[in-house]
Image (tube, rainbow, N blue to C red):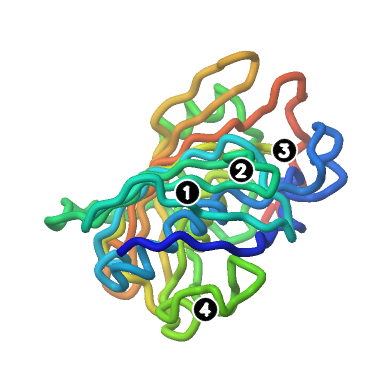
Amino acid sequence: MIDAWQGIALNTAPDSRNQIHGDEVAREFGFQGGLVPGVTISAYLVQPAVSAWGLDWLNRGRAHVRVNSPVYDGEMFAVEITTASDRDYDAVLRRPDGTISAHAEVALAKHAEIAPVRRGDTLAAVDHIGAVASPERFSELKSEGCFAFRYHWLATDSYVQDVSRVPFLLSQGGYAHMSFLLGTANWIFAANAHMNPWVHLETTSQNFRAVQKGTVVIAEMSVIDTFEKKDHLFADIEVNLFDEANDDALCRIEQRAIYRLRGVSAPARPENPNE
């Protein structure tokens, strides 16, 4: 059975280089405060899958999540199941005022999907800052390739304020939650092309193996497409995650984001600590 649930939202990135998650910049764009990251909202929507299917979903589950409007730190939310079967469900995330902020289609794959293979992209330092995001920068990354990055899952962070609401596999079992896994796609995206502020909109993810505490994750990125719509600049990317120890595929993530909001000038690139 797929169960609905409620929780209190947590802004997992208030001090992010993407200042849309901070109160000051978010309010300049008309929001009530810093935005809870889209990857964290996604974790709320897939939590019923972890509760229902456990390791099976962490090993081969898939999800498509679209974020339509903001969720704020400390705000109550409800994940409602709109349709469900024994292998899939659709869900929405609803705010206290009734606004539906996100939609998800979540499933447990019947058969193993074809896993990506690690390319061996050049690893950059974790604090590397790429050139400013632009159509030209993404064209360069598409033709010449992107830097890879290394991330370490230590099982020390949560994605919701009340940890008691988190499934045992994640809270006590040490397995990585989707806020971390999808978060790696955010981090590698913003590291290869500097942008600020920017907005995460949509992900499609496929798990290949649960990520245990202590796993060193290698993220490799490809640029799929860029386009302009209503004067916003968009980018679509694909990120594949691997276990550094044995190159096992862990997760594939397709992501869409607005990398430059309408009316915003290109940001100044911070000084790169490695230059």
Under mark 1, the amino acid is: Phe
Residue ID at (62%, 55%): 77
Q: Earlier in the sequence, mark 4 or mark 3?
A: 4
| Percent x, y of residue 246 | 27, 72
Q: CA distance from mark 3 to mark 1?
A: 21 Å
Q: CA distance from mark 1 to mark 4?
A: 25 Å
Q: Amino acid at mark 3?
A: Pro
CA distance separating discs 2 and 3: 15 Å
**Taking the image as drawn, is residue 256 in sight?**
yes
Q: Earlier in the sequence, mark 1 or mark 4?
A: 1
Query: CB of mark 2 within 8 Å of CB of mark 4?
Result: no
Q: Where is residue 57 drawn, in percent x and y? A: 29, 64
User: Disc 2 to disc 4, how far (Cα)?
Assistant: 28 Å
2 and 1 marks in contact (CB < 8 Å): yes
First-in-chain label (2 vs 3):
2
Please, what secondary structure does the residue beneath circle 1 have? loop
Which disc is residue 130 wearing? 2
Q: How far apart are labels 4 and 3 at the CA level?
A: 28 Å
Who's the residue at 22% across and 56% down the image? 87
Pointers 1 and 4 in contact (C-beta within 8 Å): no
* In this view, the mark in front (3 or 1): 3
Residue at image position (60%, 26%) is: 134
- 272 to the left or right of 125: right
Q: Which residue in the protein does label 4 denote?
A: 155
User: Callout 2: few (<14), some (14-19), or many (20+) C-alpha neighbours within 10 Å?
Assistant: many
| Mark sitting earlier along the chain (2/1) | 2
Residue found at x 55% / y 26% = 234
